[in-house]
């Protein structure tokens, strides 16, 4: 298995698991738990699970770029909070679709700050990917009311995630270590935020299974897979492959929340598949490809 194929596989797995996140999260908040409280328990449980199963990786930090880490955590906190606020306004599938402006923002960060250039295949793939997102939104661009506010919140969340992805390799931490400390940093923020807003509550035991799913399936595994994919194939490719997440969320929404998909959104799914073939088709089975990063 080539380095490229491993990276793509991990990115796809991350996208599928992340696609389940809004479904699980909104099922929990529907019971009366606030978004801040739900996110606190999500990240706290994720950190505790990682600390129990990977203590050597979590508690042995040999190298840390502190400011990069703090900005990465800030970006992740922003993305988590504003995504769920966006979903409250326009629903899970549409919110995830808007959120995926982040690969374009990430490409802009790489271009401006790292002076990276994009090959023609990636530019073409991004064009198809952006077109796919427009179709997946069903062209519901109305500059008024809840829909407009939802789009604004989704773009803010996407920008926060772009900052997080941009800084993942710059923290100096391994995938599991970075995941654990990002979870702890996020739990700290949302814990303080929910307490100061008087929205903090202890979840009932009946939510134990959903919270465990949120921590394991919707947080720990997809974050680890994503970071490992970034180390293998880089931030831009990983981000563009993870554009599968809106499709996954739409599918889960239809299966579990009775959400409907239009023929326009079906066209968006087709364009998304085309963009992935343009981006990754030529390089999937090359015999020799060097890892994007030496970090393990």
Image (cartoon, grey):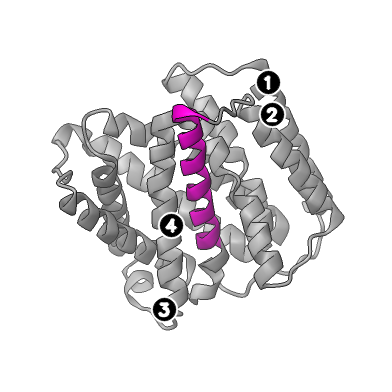
Q: Name the residue under label 3.
A: 66
Q: Residue 104 at what x, y percent from top left?
A: 66, 52
Pointer 2 or 3: first along the chain: 3
Identify the disc placed on residue 268: 2
Whole-number angstrom distance, CA of label 1 to CA of label 2: 7 Å
Pointer 4 or 3: first along the chain: 3
The residue at 21%/50% (across/down) is 194
Whole-number angstrom distance, CA of label 3 to CA of label 1: 45 Å
Q: Is the magenta stretch mostly helix, strand or loop?
A: helix
Q: Mark 1 points at which residue?
A: 264
Is disc 4 surrounded by few (<14), some (14 to 19) or many (20+) residues within 10 Å?
Answer: many
The residue at 18%/31% (across/down) is 206
Q: Residue 190 at what x, y percent from top left?
A: 27, 54
Magenta span covers which residues? 144-165
Is disc 2 surrounded by few (<14), some (14 to 19) or many (20+) residues within 10 Å?
Answer: many
Whole-number angstrom distance, CA of label 2 to CA of label 4: 27 Å
- Could you tell me which quadrant the C terminus lies in? bottom right
The residue at 82%/57% (across/down) is 286
Q: In this view, does 238 lie to the left or right of 200?
A: right
- Does residue 292 appear in the picture of this structure? no
Marks 4/3 in contact by CB < 8 Å: the verdict is no
Identify the disc placed on residue 76: 4
Element under disc 3: helix
Q: Nearer the viewer, residue 250 or 34?
A: 34
Q: Residue 271 at what x, y percent from top left?
A: 74, 32
Marks 1/2 in contact by CB < 8 Å: the verdict is yes
Element under disc 1: helix
Is disc 1 surrounded by few (<14), some (14 to 19) or many (20+) residues within 10 Å?
Answer: some
Q: Tell me if residue 287 is in the magenta stretch.
A: no
């Amino acid at each position: 298995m080539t380095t490229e194929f491993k990276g793509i596989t991990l990115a796809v797995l991350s996208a599928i698991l992340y696609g389940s996140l809004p479904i699980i999260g909104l099922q929990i908040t529907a019971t009366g738990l606030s978004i801040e409280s739900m996110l606190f328990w999500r990240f706290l449980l994720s950190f505790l699970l990682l600390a129990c199963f990977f203590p050597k990786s979590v508690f042995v930090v040999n190298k840390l770029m502190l400011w990069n880490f703090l900005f990465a955590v800030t970006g992740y906190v922003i993305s988590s909070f504003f995504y769920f606020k966006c979903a409250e306004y326009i629903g899970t599938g549409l919110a995830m679709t808007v959120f995926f402006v982040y690969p374009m923002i990430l490409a802009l960060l790489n271009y401006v700050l790292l002076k990276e250039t994009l090959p023609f295949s990636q530019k073409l793939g991004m064009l198809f990917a952006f077109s796919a997102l427009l179709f997946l939104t069903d062209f519901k661009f109305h500059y008024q009311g809840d829909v407009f506010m939802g789009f604004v919140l989704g773009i803010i969340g996407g920008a926060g995630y772009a900052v997080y992805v941009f800084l993942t390799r710059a923290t100096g931490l391994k995938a599991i270590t970075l995941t654990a400390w990002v979870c702890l940093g996020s739990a700290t923020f949302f814990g303080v935020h929910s307490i100061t807003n008087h929205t903090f509550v202890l979840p009932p035991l009946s939510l134990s299974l959903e919270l465990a799913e949120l921590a394991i399936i919707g947080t720990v595994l997809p974050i680890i897979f994503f970071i490992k994919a970034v180390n293998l194939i880089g931030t831009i490719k990983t981000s563009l492959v993870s554009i599968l997440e809106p499709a996954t969320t739409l599918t889960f929404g239809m299966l579990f929340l009775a959400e409907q998909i239009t023929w326009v959104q079906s066209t968006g799914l087709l364009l998304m598949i085309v963009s992935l073939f343009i981006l990754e088709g030529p390089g999937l089975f090359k015999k020799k490809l060097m890892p994007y990063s030496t970090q393990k």
